[in-house]
Image: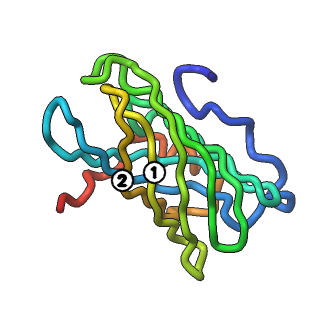
Amino acid sequence: MGPATGIWLPEPGPKATQGPLTGIWLSTYEYTSSGREQTYIDQHHVLLIQHGRKLQARSLLGSAPSKLMMDLTINGQVITGTWTEETNPAGYYQGSTYHGAIQLLSDPTGHHLTGQWVGFGRDFDVNAGPWKLELLTTDTSPAAMTTYDQPPPPADSH
């Protein structure tokens, strides 16, 4: 892990060595809380860095009280990998760590990734739900990261 602010990913290398998906993205996923019998939407601003077929995404720590990371591989328009979230220590899940698999499809512009996550629940059941990422900017400069190191606007509810 890194410091209490910023990101927990190595600094982006020279732009010339990065792939076209590199940028700051809005990550949005849905999950159902069995204990609260309600569906929730969580969002993070994430820094996504692409090197060849490998993608790493890490949440900007000021964007949410939980920490999110994804390690992914891209094959054409199909993106597959794993996700991990360290939940808010002061929240309902009391800092629990959840992890699972994710598969996303890139739209032809490369600006929207949509798919599904799968992972285990508190009662050791297997859950799944929608996950999408929207490109906000290809600028990964310190100034851009500072701009997005805050909570996203509230998600649209269904």
Q: Which residue is drawn at 57% across and 71% down?
A: 106
Give whichever of discs 1 and 2 has the lower sequence position: 1
Q: Residue at x 41, y 35 (%)?
A: 120
* 10 Å crowding of disc 2: few (<14), some (14-19), many (20+): some
Any mark on residue 117, and which? 1
Any mark on residue 129, and which? 2
As shown in the figure, which amino acid type bears the numbered disc 2? Gly
Secondary-structure class at tag 1: strand
Front residue of 144/64: it is 64
Secondary-structure class at tag 2: strand
Dividing the picture into quadrants, the one containing residue 31 is top left
Task: Give the CA distance from mark 1 to mark 2.
Answer: 6 Å
> In the rendered structure, are the residues bearing label 1 and label 2 in contact, judged by CB atoms less than 8 Å apart?
yes
Vertical placement of residue 139 versus 36, above or below: below
Q: In the image, is 99 to the left or to the right of 53?
A: left
Residue 60 visible within the image? no
Q: In the image, is 72 to the left or to the right of 6?
A: right
Q: Which residue is drawn at 20% across and 35% down?
A: 34
Image spot of residue 78 (x, y percent): 63, 68
